[in-house]
Amino acid sequence: MAVNPSIITRDLDKVSEPTENIYESIHIVGQRAKQISNNLKEELNNKLSEFASTVDNLEEVFENKEQIEISKFYERMPKPTSLAMEEFMEGKVYYRYPEEEAE
């Protein structure tokens, strides 16, 4: 049975340590993963838009090797949730509680 190298077992005590609540920690990681995902999608779309074709004729549509290579590069990148969890565990994620700021 093959083991997926992208699956990492996390110690829940270490994950919950910064916030003292596992649910808050997971929420923060999830929000950061959304930010990373949106940034990557925007970056990918910008790069692919350089190769966009305005031709609607099927005979003139061709395979663009650069576009395929760019897509493959982004497919091989680590997933946003993995990146977000690594940032959180290394203390690189800034988070705040808006209700505490109002006081």
Image (cartoon, rainbow, N blue to C red):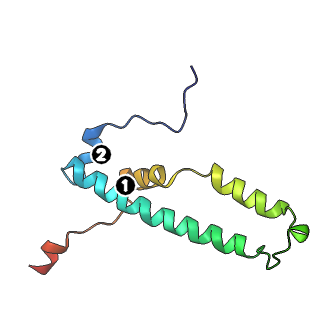
Q: Quadrant of the C terminus?
A: bottom left
Residue lying at 24% horizontally and 69% vertically, measured from the top left: 96
Farthest residue in the top direction? 1
Callout 2: few (<14), some (14-19), or many (20+) C-alpha neighbours within 10 Å?
many
Looking at the image, residue 17 sits to the left or right of residue 91; the answer is left
Residue type at mark 2?
Val
Count residues near mark 1 (Cα–Cα under 10 Å), then give few for <14, some for 14-19, many for 20+. many
Q: To which residue does mark 2 refer? A: 15
The quadrant of the rendering that contains the N terminus is top right
Q: Residue at x 19, y 74 (%)?
A: 98
Instruction: Give residue 84's quadrant in the image.
Output: bottom left
Q: Which residue is mark 1?
A: 88
- How many marks the image carries: the answer is 2
Instruction: Find residue 91 and report its image quarter.
Output: bottom left
Whole-number angstrom distance, CA of label 1 to CA of label 2: 8 Å
- For image coordinates 23% across by 47% down, the residue present is 22
Picture quadrant where residue 65 is located: bottom right
| C-beta proximity under 8 Å, tags 1 and 2 | yes
At a point 58% along the width and 24% down the height, the residue shown is: 2
Give the image location of residue 32, x and y in percent.
Answer: 39, 62
- For the residue marked with disc 1, what is the amino acid? Phe
Estimate the x, y position of residue 40 in percent, counting from the top left.
56, 65
